[in-house]
Image: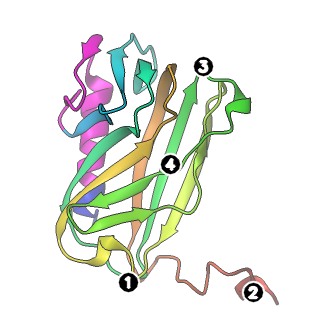
Amino acid sequence: MTHPCVAKVAESVLVLRQSDLTGAIEENTHIVPEVYFSADSANGTAAVELLPRQDALLKVRVTVTGLPDWLTFNIGMGEGRFQARDTLGVVAEVSTDLKAESDFRATPFIRSDQMGDTHFAAGFALSTEAQPASLLHPVTSADALTYGSVYHTLVLPLPKRTMTLTVHALRLIHMDASEGLSAEMAKLGCFAV
């Protein structure tokens, strides 16, 4: 059975793919339900303009002025509960017009209502070449994801720079504890024979 948070993200991605939106959007305004950009406006701004996307899921021009403390792309996951020993994954194909030497890695995290954040250990390299990447996170009892059935948001931090961002594909995956990666499996020694 599909986890409700995975189903919610898939639904939002489908609506986004079927949309044909262009033009400027206000910060924190949903592009489609549950999908939006957010930036700190105390020290700077990030103006977002939806561009024609051709075969991509989303293409935007982000114009940054000043130095906002954060700039993120967010997808609401809805309400759900995760168990320790579950495995969460993000599969994405993203590109920007930033040069590779910017060395920015977009390391996603999941914000769990008022409970806290669960950070993936690695991130996606953002460059001019769109390359599919997969990130897995073995859920532990210390992760905010396990604190209750609350609203979760998948958050992708972005460079606080003017850029064009293209999201070619995005998918959230979940394996429950019975089929997920255990903490022991994440260690290299378990593969030694």
- Residue receiving disc 3: 97
Percent from the top left, x then y, of residue 48?
Answer: 34, 19
Checking the image for residue 141, the label placed there is 1
Residue on which disc 2 sits: 189
Mark 2 vs mark 3, CA separation in Å: 40 Å
Q: Which residues are magenta?
A: 7-33
Nearer the observer, 28 or 187:
28
Residue drawn at x 41%, y 39% as measured from the top left? 69
Picture residue at 48% right of the left edge, 37% below the top: 158
Q: Nearer the viewer, residue 182 or 70?
A: 70
For residue 86, say whether it is visible: yes
- Confirm whether the magenta stretch covers residue 134: no
**First reached walking from the N terminus: tag 1 or tag 4:** 4
- Distance, label 4 to label 2, CA atoms, is 26 Å
Vertical position of residue 77 compared to residue 174: above or below: above
Q: Give the CA separation, mark 1 to mark 4.
A: 23 Å
Element type at marker 1?
loop
Q: Disc 2 vs disc 3: which is toward the camera?
A: 3
Distance from Cα at disc 4 to Cα at disc 3:
21 Å
Instruction: Say which of 48 and 189 sits in front.
Output: 48
The amino acid pointed to by label 1 is Ser
Task: Classify mark 1: residues with Cα within 10 Å, few (<14), some (14-19) or many (20+).
Answer: few
Of the numbered discs 2 and 3, the one sitting upstream in the chain is: 3
